[in-house]
Amino acid sequence: MFVYIHVPFCSSICSYCDFPKVLYDKKYIDKYLDRLDEEIDARYRGEKVKSIFIGGGTPTSLSYQELEKLLKLKDKLFLDNDIEFTIESNVECLNEEKIKLLKKYGVNRVSLGVQSFNDKVLKDLNRHHTGADVFRVVDCLKKNGIFSISIDLIYGVNDDIDIVRDDINNFLRLDIPHVSCYSLIIENNTLYGVNNREYIDDDIEYKMYTFISNTLEEHGYKHYEVSNYAKDGYYSLHNINYWDNGEYYGFGMGAVSYINSNRISNTRNLSKYLKGDMIDSIIYEDKETSMSNSIILGLRKVKGIDVLEFNLRYGVDIINLYNIRELIDEGKLVYKNGYLYIATDYYYVANDILVNFV
């Protein structure tokens, strides 16, 4: 089983962020953590946990004492010996004291929201660190024995491809095993959306994507999901479970669980969550919906879908579903060595292919 724990508190709100979040306010923290404790007690059924992922928001925006209370929640779970234990953090929210605390409680993977090393871009995104800060924090993580480090980068904030080149070169200088690279998405209820921010030219964005992909692969990073690259042995097990449409618990405001074919969505309203009115909806997913989701998620992986595994899971022949044969004939999908996957030339427009299965 896989467990996601959501901490919605942030020290500031980024211009592009659409995740369930609120500004940090100390008066809510203890009660929120108590509700998390109660939710885990009420819903967790004692399965062995292979991965914990604490995301947000910014979990490390909590004070030292609050963060320790959060990390102690792991003791309520039956943990696999080789557990992957990830926490998300903003660069400015980590210091050596907190890093030592993470290490003490078994965190062995840290995902840093970097987005860019360029200070002008960071200001545009309303981030509150500098490029130099990233190197300082990564060095401190390594010094304290945390080597499985990932960073997030965003490209397409402006049309300057030199900034993207510098970002990738700076990532390579960090000498860490994982990076997630996302093109800017402008959601309606974000600062960018409200201010009618426009996208850059598609051709320029494609050149950025191609540069990122080619450069990372030349340096030994495997492109294992549309937006994710890693050295061997450092793929995100937690996210792979999502892309395999596997089961998982989601605890906390706005978190989602997938258990026994039920998609359980928690409220995105902090007041409701604090009052114990946690669950917003429970939707049973029938076979057709589950198959559709498994295809959409599975094709995000570069290696794609294990056809035999899919056919056994659903009792069907995937090649005869939807318009898959047509997409294979068009060269957009490839069926080879037992796997169905998006052709390399179409990674960049993967969403245009995936919409066929919605």
Image (spheres, rainbow, N blue to C red):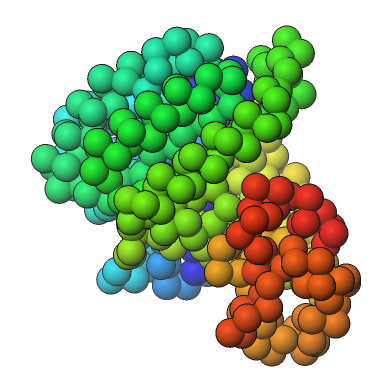
Q: Relative to 296, say whether 196 is above or below.
A: above
Q: Nearer the viewer, residue 144 or 177?
A: 177
Frontmost residue, 285 versus 148: 148
Q: Residue at x 38, y 35 (%)?
A: 168
Q: x%, y% of residue 99?
A: 22, 36
Residue at the spot 66% in from the left edge and 82% down from the top edge: 307
Q: Quadrant of residue 120?
A: top left
Decide: is 57 above or below 84: above
Please name whichever residue, 152 or 82, is drawn nearer the observer in this view of the structure: 152
Does residue 264 appear to the left or right of 205 in the view shown? right
Instruction: Classify 120 as above or below 246.
Output: above
Check the image and name the residue furthest to the left.
143
Question: Looking at the image, can residue 309 be seen?
Answer: no
Q: Is residue 187 visible?
A: yes
Q: Kindly identify the residue that appears in the image at 71 percent across and 15 percent down.
A: 197
Given residues 225 and 53, the one toward you in this image is 225
Q: State which quadrant residue 150 falls in.
A: top left
Q: Which quarter shows the C terminus?
A: bottom right
Across and down, in percent, residue 34 comes to 46, 40
- Residue drawn 32% across the image and 20% down it: 131
Q: Give the left or right position of residue 139, taking residue 351 as reference.
A: left
Q: Position of residue 190 (x, y in %)?
A: 68, 20
